[in-house]
Amino acid sequence: MMRRILLALFFVFAVSPAFAANILVVIDIPMQTMHVRVDGVTKYRWDVSTGRPGYTTPAGRYQPIRMHKKWYSKKYDNAPMPYAIFFHGGYAIHGTTDLKNLGRIASHGCVRLHPDNAAMLFALVKEIGSENTIIRIRS
């Protein structure tokens, strides 16, 4: 009987949100980089492209609002936005085909990543949960 109680308590604590992993995505606009930290440990550092003049990327602290594995921009000629993680209105972190501009200011305000990196981030956020993910954008 005691073993069952201990097993039940372990299960409750193991799946409790208090014990869930946390993701911190830090986007540094001046450096055009993204750092992804899981439980305080940096797992990834990637080059990104953020908003060019006239199309700023909004600085601040956000959480994912919605996620789409395949998405097409309704505003910019149906441009593909694979692995889109929307964080503020129409702003998202997503994959890009414009790889030559990663590490440079080039977007219409979204945060662009290499598609492989966007897929990894998307899977990580999906696994750990939007509610356990913070996106911090520094200007």
Image (spheres, helix red, strand yellow):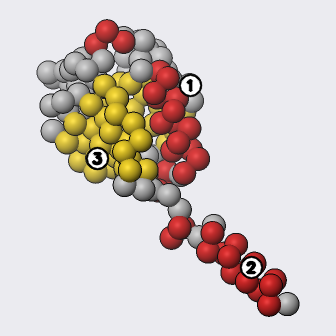
Q: Callout 1 environment at 10 Å: few (<14), some (14 to 19), or many (20+)?
A: few
The picture places residue 122, in percent across and down from the top left corner, at 51, 36
* Residue 92 appears in the figure: no
Circle 2: residue type: Ala
Say which residue label 3 marks.
136
Tag shown at residue 57: none
Q: Is residue 64 above or below residue 74?
A: below
Counting every numbered tag in the picture gives 3
Label 2 or label 1, whichever lies nearer to me, is 2
Q: Which residue is mark 1?
A: 70
Seen at 54% across and 51% down, the residue is: 128
The residue sitting at 46% across, 28% down in the picture is 118
Using the rendered image of the protein, determine whether residue 49 is visible from the camera's viewpoint.
yes
Q: Could you tell me the amino acid type at mark 3?
A: Arg
Q: Quadrant of the C terminus?
A: top left
Q: Do the residues bearing badges 1 and 3 touch, measured as CB atoms within 8 Å? A: no
Up/down of 21 relative to 34, above or below: below
What is the distance, in whole Å, between disc 2 and disc 3 at their CAs?
37 Å
Q: Nearer the viewer, residue 12 or 135?
A: 12
Q: Amino acid at mark 1?
A: Lys
Which residue is outermost to the right? 1
Disc 2 from disc 1: Cα separation: 40 Å
Q: Is residue 130 above or below residue 36?
A: below
- Which part of the image, by quadrant, shows the N terminus? bottom right
| x then y, percent, for residue 54 | 15, 23
Which mark sits nearer the N-terminus, 2 or 3?
Answer: 2
Q: Secondary structure at mark 2?
A: helix
Verify CB contact (< 8 Å) between mark 2 and mark 3: no
x%, y% of residue 53? 14, 21
Mark 2 lies on residue = 8
Q: Are marks 2 and 1 in contact (CB under 8 Å)?
A: no
- Separation of residues labelled 1 and 3 (CA atoms): 23 Å
